[in-house]
Amino acid sequence: MKISCDVNVQHLTRVEGHGNIKISIKDGKVREASWEVVETPRFFEAMLVGKHWENAPYLCGRICGICSIGHTLASIRAVENAFGITPSAQTADLRLLLKHMETLQSHILHLYFLAAPDFLGTGSVLPLAKTHPEEVARALRLKLLANDACDLIGGRRLHPTRTVVGGFTMLPEKRQLAEIGKRLQECVPDLLAAAELFKTFAIPDFSRETEFVSLKGGESYPFIGGGLVSSDGVRKKEHQYRAMTNEYCQPGFTSKLSRLSRDAFAVGALARLNNNFALLHPTAREISAALGLSPVNHNPYLNNVAQLVECVHVVFDSLRIIEAMLDTPWQEPRQPVTACRGKGVGAVEVPRGILYHYYEFDAQGRVKKADCVIPTSQNHGNIQRDIAALARDYARKGKTDQDIELLAEMLVRAYDPCISCSVH
Amino acid sequence: MSDALSYLGVPLSRPRVGFFELTSCEGCQLQILNNEATLLDFLNLVTIVNFREGMSERSDDYEIAFVEGSVSREDEIVRLREIREKARVLVALGSCACFGGVNRLKNRFGDLAWVKKEVYGDFAIETRDVQPLEDFVTVDLKIYGCPVKKEEVERIVTNLVVGKAVRLPEYPVCMECKANENICLFELGEPCLGPVTRAGCDAWCTGNRRGCWGCRGPAEVANIKELEKIMTRHGFSREVLIDRLECFGGFASCLDTLTGKKKKAGRNKA
Ligand code: SF4
Ligand code: SF4
Ligand code: SF4
Ligand SMILES: [Fe+2]
């Protein structure tokens, strides 16, 4: 059947930031299939110039309201790398735990509030509070737990206060940490129930050969720092990130874009999982298999499933960290910092993919140059090409405007884009 | 959600509320979703008709508009004016909306061409000096903070719904900090803007042993000269003071006095 259709979504909903989808098909031929980003830029990299190093993590956290912890940690890592500071084991563990809780918080927010309504045929989570009260209560419980843990470790769930270059301004009480551990233990059935719910969702059958870029874990699933890898076989060191990101601009697009071996690549939960599957917690791997996800998978809609699998992983890994912490007396929370001339990169796997911060400092520790490369900006090129492929597929198969519109929206949402972050 | 809403036994209609964002990190809106424990009760108070980040349905029929973010492009002025026309009450949500927020730091160079080039090279990109909402439209209510404090948002919304006056603290963060018996950051060798910053956050940062950076802007009586003396006494440079004062845009006029710069009068006022 030759179809014609016009899809024009201005300011797509249930994503962070402002983007538009346009698809035009005439007699089975795709005329236009685009993903546009129209967000207003904020110029963080310019703002930082001339500022003393202390400002960098504090300001850069404000790049993103959803993953402010990830930005703060990437920024801190870049400053520490520039000054030659190695975090203590305690600091590294606490940061990872904090990072895990942000991952859990962000993935649950995306899965239940932004993605699930499409699978359950509603426009938002609000009607679900009536039709699926247990599921909504479960999501709120998981999110609350993750956010409470972020408050406890980072001082604040959004724009953290305790995280500084050199460590933490203060530490949680062991008693409170044990309480979080107990709640994490108790949330495992909630996660298993979430997996059962997602099993019932009809994930669109679509795939397009994609290059996946992520950190490469050695002994553990990667989150903070380390080598960079792509599923096409590229490997780089953390400080060589520019060879991985290759940013460029595109007319009418306010975010930068990236490419590597091909004209686009993908980052995020699916990329991490595809590149590091063996390092996931065994239960996470089992759930992944039960939900039909095994590496390397090229269906972008399965990023939702990959997020759920990562939720399971971070909960088990957090339990491991907390248990070890409860057995060790607290050390000094913070080490002294001496600024010096230098350059540093911090690469961190934030919920939506790999995030890089880079700073160059003068001898007084003032920023001479800053560069931040955001996961969503790395995904934009891939989203564009997925939308084009999706339009081609369905132009052939024949679908109604409404179906194509929904599938295109769900596709973009599956990437969990953080658009205002990508246009920092 | 639930059907009847009443306050002190008086039935109330749930106002129609819209959330909008200009140049921002969307963190202030997210703070509303971050109210897991009270979210459902909160949603019960109002009818949300526009919340792009959370729902697909949209309506232009709303009474209260919460606008997050600052103005940094021409099209945002148009959007903001449209929202103002439709809303009975326009609330500036967060420091970006109230003062311009961190976004405003790019204004300090006074050279937009350089700012654009630093980030985008020769690629053409549109931007303007960052300004708060009130430079363009009448703002009925400001909720300060970067981010806003969710408890405060809930209290303010409840007051709006039941028609009670909204009063924000006029005293400085120091009062809350001392009431909470925190160790003073100056004693720990850290600078703090608590003495001049408007309270209401329950000394959020200082309670976590992080100095206040003044995200809520100046308290009713903010003695910057006195703060400068305290900072000098504790060995902090003017640069440290200025870094903090200029971070969120709330102290712009105090900064001008401090640095002897003349305030650019009424630029681009609507
Ligand atoms: S005030 Fe802060 S938290 Fe709120 S939108 Fe602006 S940068 Fe984000
Ligand atoms: S820490 Fe800051 S807010 Fe608290 S008492 Fe000291 S100066 Fe005031
Ligand atoms: S302590 Fe200061 S910087 Fe922190 S939230 Fe309160 S006003 Fe804002
Ligand atoms: Fe950037």
Image (spheres, coloured by chain):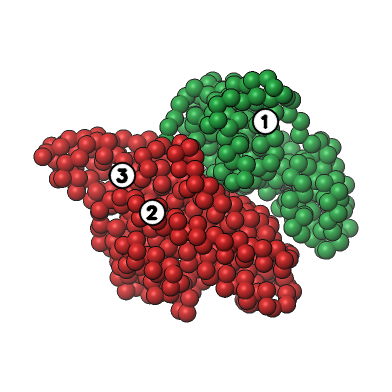
Earlier along the polypeptide chain: callout 3 or callout 2?
Answer: 2
Q: Residues within 10 Å of mark 2 (few under 14, many from 20)?
A: some
Q: Is residue B188 above or below residue B105?
A: below
- Whether A416 is drawn above or below A179: the answer is above
Q: Which residue is the site of mark 1?
A: B158
Labels 1 and 2 share a subunit? no
The residue located at (36%, 39%) in the rendering is A121
Q: Is residue B25 visible?
A: no
Q: Which chain is green?
A: B
Chain letter of the residue beneath label 2 in the structure image? A
Q: Which mark is residue A198?
A: 2
In the structure shown, which secondary structural element does the residue marked by tag 3 occupy? helix
Q: Secondary structure at mark 2?
A: helix
Percent of width and height locating residue B23: 54, 40
| Amino acid type, mark 2 | Phe
- Amino acid under label 1? Thr
In the foreground, A252 or B151: B151
Residue type highlighted by circle 3:
Ala
Residue at image mark 3: A408
